[in-house]
Amino acid sequence: MRNDPLFHPGWIRFNEQRWELSAEPLVLTPEKGDAWRLETVLYRNRQGRLVTPPRNPHLPIDFHCASERPASRNRRKRLALTRLADHLQQCEFGGSLSLSSVADDVRPFEWANMAARPRYTYHLDIASREEAIDPSARKKARKCRRLGYRCETTEDYAAVAACLAGPESRKGFDYRLDAEELARLAELMGPEHFVCFLARNAEGEAMGTRVCLFQPGGHALAWSAGMKTEAMKDGVNNLVAEEALEFFDRQGCSVFDFIGANIAPVAEMKEAWGGRLVCHYSISRRGIRQLAREAYVTARTMMKRESK
């Protein structure tokens, strides 16, 4: 079973339709035998260049190895990622490619003359979350309930979109999703893989939301979240996260991916949930600017050493 919901055909179709891209499923295996297997989905823009689609945290990768011995698994994974790097080396990039954390060995891409930039997220083991979550996160969720808030799963995509507009206006970015797009994605993926959580205050007004993609038995992704400005101090985000974790526990999901921990305030908020800090990589072609910068850094380092 592939753990990542970004392999779902409905998600792939959504990316093709919404962003005018062509999906390119890729399966790599050894020339002989079945010692390992690597699967991913790449996307090309209208110019035929590889891109990470907007609103995609990463490109999904699944790796299967016939052996559980560390030495064999490490070697075969290196071989599989080398094959992937060789494939990418033959393609034009339309921007950087954000890879799944499954590609935790970035050396094959660097050996193929690509630049790699680390990015971070938190993975929370859902089954053992009670021991991991900081009491402060639970406290904020309890405060929210005392204020009369309740959280539910919903198909009220207009209310969800209104909550997503909160951080858009505060932080000056665009989720590029409206109620119609959310409804279309829900139809493409189905309730077994797509869910919206909505927090309402004591008056029944929608105040916060979290939109998630999930694979039962696999990973759940905190894809989009937002709350209205007036509810920011009420602990709404914590209430919704708590309800989401309970929901995914019932679905048999193993890991909750908080999606992104690269901005200091965001990282501080997410780390309270006790997840494991996970690194994944964004890779890009080494252009003239990249090479010039690396040459400058190397020369400066050597000059400092010589001056000592």
Image: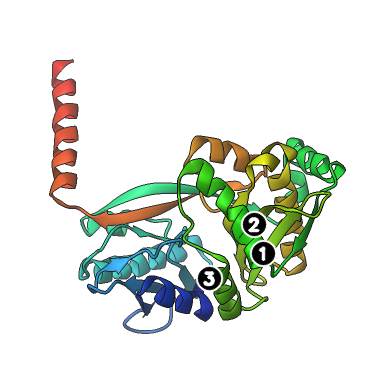
Residue type pointed to by label 2: Arg
* Residue at the disc numbered 1: 196
- What residue is shown at x 67% (from left), y 71% (from top)? 217
Location of the C terminus by quadrant is: top left
Q: Where is residue 163 in the image (x, y as percent from the top left)?
A: 63, 53
- What residue is shown at x 35% (from left), y 72% (from top)? 43
Q: Does residue 243 appear left or right of residue 125 in this picture?
A: right
**Along the line of sight, the residue nearer the viewer: 221 or 115:** 221
**Along the line of sight, the residue nearer the viewer: 240 or 234:** 234
- In the figure, 67 relative to 95: above or below? below
Location of the N terminus by quadrant is: bottom right
- For disc 3, the neighbor class at 10 Å (few under 14, some 14 to 19, many from 20) is some
Q: Does residue 17 appear left or right of residue 68 in this picture?
A: left
Label 2 with label 3: CB-CB less than 8 Å: no
- What residue is shown at x 63% (from left), y 78% (from top)? 190
**Distance between the Cα atoms at labels 3 and 1?**
13 Å
Q: Position of residue 138 (x, y in %)?
A: 78, 42
Viewer-side label of 2, 3: 3
Q: Position of residue 181 (x, y in %)?
A: 53, 70
**Which numbered disc flags the more N-terminal residue, 3 or 1?**
3
- For disc 2, the neighbor class at 10 Å (few under 14, some 14 to 19, many from 20) is many
Q: Is mark 3 on a helix, strand or loop?
A: helix
Label 2 with label 1: CB-CB less than 8 Å: yes
* Residue at the disc numbered 3: 181
Q: Which residue lies furthest to the top in this view?
A: 308
- In the figure, 137 relative to 152: above or below? above
**Along the line of sight, the residue nearer the viewer: 280 or 81:** 280
Viewer-side label of 3, 1: 3
**Distance between the Cα atoms at labels 2 and 1?**
6 Å
**Which numbered disc flags the more N-terminal residue, 2 or 1?**
1
